[in-house]
Image (tube, grey):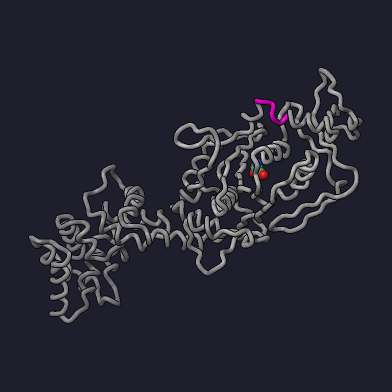
């Protein structure tokens, strides 16, 4: 039987990391088994509907590469299944009526606050009286099912109320539409968060009532901030978009959330979506909550950033470089040199902006910044070193090698480290004790004229 999984979000807000992880597991499980992954929007609860939430779901899934395999082809990808649209053909009502016929459900005319209800035996549709349709839950006995993560689960039927299938407004309830859709879409494996574990007996009872085979259930534990707190909107760590705003790469987010609740077999923790699609195994899904660890997520992100081709890093970095620009035009400097120096110094893209403000201007700094024990420099030594630097940099060639050779020769001649010249140069060019690239790179990056201008200014400051 061909594996068919689905992601069935309710459009009630932005894409929570837990929801994205559910989608990811459903996607990679389907891929691993050569099956299909389906997106179904469960929007029958209009009270909880949030405008724009479906678009966020589509965009996030597409951005993460979790493309769904079915739906009507609208060009540029499939339109997903949407419950409110499926409802228009009377799909859910048809199945509810089938259960009434089978004596598995009944019309209920009781007010919501009624304590007892005498509708249980009614198969009759009374005209002009509002009604709901309820499932008739067996009086005694138990309902059992097996979850692939949590094992055998058994509940007494006496604990389950006669659940509403169709509400008084004619809309199906979540539980009912969810089961009808999973069955009619031939879903073989239901993968979702364990907050749905407690409604699963109700689902299983519906399958029984219809005489259908339930799917395989795989419930994953929640992602927590710590032992007692969920990831929350307030802490800015709940949504996919929060992490994009913090400068995480999509592929790193996908990689990290795969590990939140699933352990790969070996030591390796770096997985592309393709690799996850072959490595993923439900036996690695954990029963206990996954604790979100931003330090680890940063380390994974840093790995992805380090391994990007320079050109790709540059494309990603430019908006962050320009973010601190006082004017709209970024200065004409060598961005390849800047990006090559930034890349190993970047864990998340937002690390970039505060490191590069010097390309626009040198902020005022204290002269004691020139004190550096290791390089044996001070404001006094810097004053003369910068005068030498002016001469060295003011050459016709102005190539990195040429400047380097000149500094090297000079430092050898004077019996000092090359840093004796390059550290003051860096301070003069950036106004900072540490900068991406060091004095030489920054000099070449800024170009001859700008470098000379900054050095002259620094000399004035020191004199
Ligand atoms: N619509 C449910 C939700 O909001 C999904 C339940 C399921 O996956 O079965 O998450």
User: Which quadrant holds residue 421?
Assistant: bottom left
> Which residue reaches farthest left?
396
Of residues 308 and 314, the one drawn nearer to the viewer in this rendering = 308
Left or right: 118 with respect to 228? right
Q: Looking at this view, is 273 or 239 the one in front?
A: 273
Range covered by the magenta-colored residues: 89-93
- Please provide percent x and percent y for residue 223: 61, 55
**Up/down of 267 relative to 48, above or below:** below
**Residue 316 at x, y percent in the picture:** 36, 50
Nearer to the camera, 303 or 231? 303
User: What's the residue at 10%, 66% (across, down)?
Assistant: 391
Could you tell me which residue is drawn at 65 percent across and 35 percent down?
48
> Which of the four quarters of the rendered structure image does ligand 1 lie in?
top right
> Principal SS element in the magenta part?
helix
Residue sitting at 16 percent across and 74 percent down? 408
Q: Is residue 388 above or below residue 244?
A: below
**x, y (%) of residue 404?**
17, 69
Determine the residue located farthest toward the front in the rendered image: 1
Left or right placement of residue 237 versus residue 391 in this view:
right
Q: Is residue 91 magenta?
A: yes
Q: Nearer the viewer, residue 371 or 195?
A: 195
User: Does residue 10 sit above or below 458 in this rendering?
Assistant: above
Above or below for 340 versus 236 = below
Examine the rendering and report whether any part of residue 191 can be seen: yes
Q: Quadrant of the C terminus?
A: bottom left
The quarter holding residue 162 reads top right
- Residue 296 image point, x, y percent: 51, 63
Q: Residue at coordinates 26% horizontally, 69% vertically from top-left?
A: 370
């Amino acid at each position: 039987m061909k594996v068919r999984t689905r992601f069935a979000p309710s459009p009630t807000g932005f894409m929570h990391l837990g929801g994205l992880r559910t989608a990811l597991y459903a996607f990679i499980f389907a891929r691993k088994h050569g099956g299909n992954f389906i997106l179904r929007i469960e929007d029958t609860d209009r009270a909880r509907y949030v405008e724009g939430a479906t678009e966020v779901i589509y965009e996030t899934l597409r951005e993460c590469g979790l493309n769904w395999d079915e739906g009507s082809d609208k060009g540029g990808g499939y339109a997903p299944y949407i419950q409110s649209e499926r409802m228009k053909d009377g799909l859910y009502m048809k199945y509810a009526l089938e259960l009434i016929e089978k004596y598995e459900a009944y019309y209920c005319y009781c007010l919501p606050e009624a304590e007892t209800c005498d509708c249980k035996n009614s198969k009759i549709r009374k005209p002009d009286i509002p009604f709901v349709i309820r499932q008739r839950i067996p009086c005694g006995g138990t309902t059992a099912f097996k979850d692939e993560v949590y094992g055998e689960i058994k509940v007494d039927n006496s604990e389950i109320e006669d659940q509403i299938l169709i509400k008084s407004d004619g809309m199906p309830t979540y539980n009912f539409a969810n089961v009808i859709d999973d069955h009619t879409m031939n879903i073989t494996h239901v993968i979702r968060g364990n907050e749905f574990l407690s409604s699963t007996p109700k689902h299983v009872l519906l399958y029984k009532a219809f005489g259908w085979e339930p799917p395989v259930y795989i419930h994953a534990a929640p992602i927590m901030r710590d032992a007692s707190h969920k990831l929350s909107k307030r802490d800015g760590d709940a949504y996919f978009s929060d992490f994009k705003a913090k400068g995480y790469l999509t592929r790193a987010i996908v990689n990290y959330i795969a590990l939140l609740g699933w352990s790969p077999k070996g030591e390796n923790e770096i997985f592309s979506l393709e690799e996850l699609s072959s490595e993923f195994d439900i036996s690695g899904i954990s029963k206990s909550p996954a604790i979100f660890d931003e330090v680890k997520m940063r380390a994974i992100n840093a790995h992805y950033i380090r391994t990007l081709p320079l050109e790709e890093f540059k494309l990603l970095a430019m908006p962050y470089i320009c973010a601190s620009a006082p004017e709209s035009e970024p200065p004409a400097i060598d961005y390849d040199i800047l990006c090559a120096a930034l890349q190993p110094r970047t864990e998340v893209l937002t690390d970039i902006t505060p490191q590069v403000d010097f390309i626009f201007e040198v902020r005022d700094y204290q002269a004691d910044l020139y004190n550096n024990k290791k390089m044996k420099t001070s404001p006094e030594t810097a004053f003369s070193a910068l005068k030498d630097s002016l001469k060295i940099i003011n050459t016709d060639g102005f190539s990195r090698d040429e400047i380097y050779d000149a500094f090297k020769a000079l430092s050898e001649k004077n019996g000092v480290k090359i840093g004796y010249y390059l550290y003051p140069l860096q301070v003069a060019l950036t106004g900072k004790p540490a900068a991406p690239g060091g004095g030489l790179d920054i000099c070449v990056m800024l170009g001859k004229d700008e470098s000379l201008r900054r050095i002259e200014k620094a000399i004035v400051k020191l004199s």
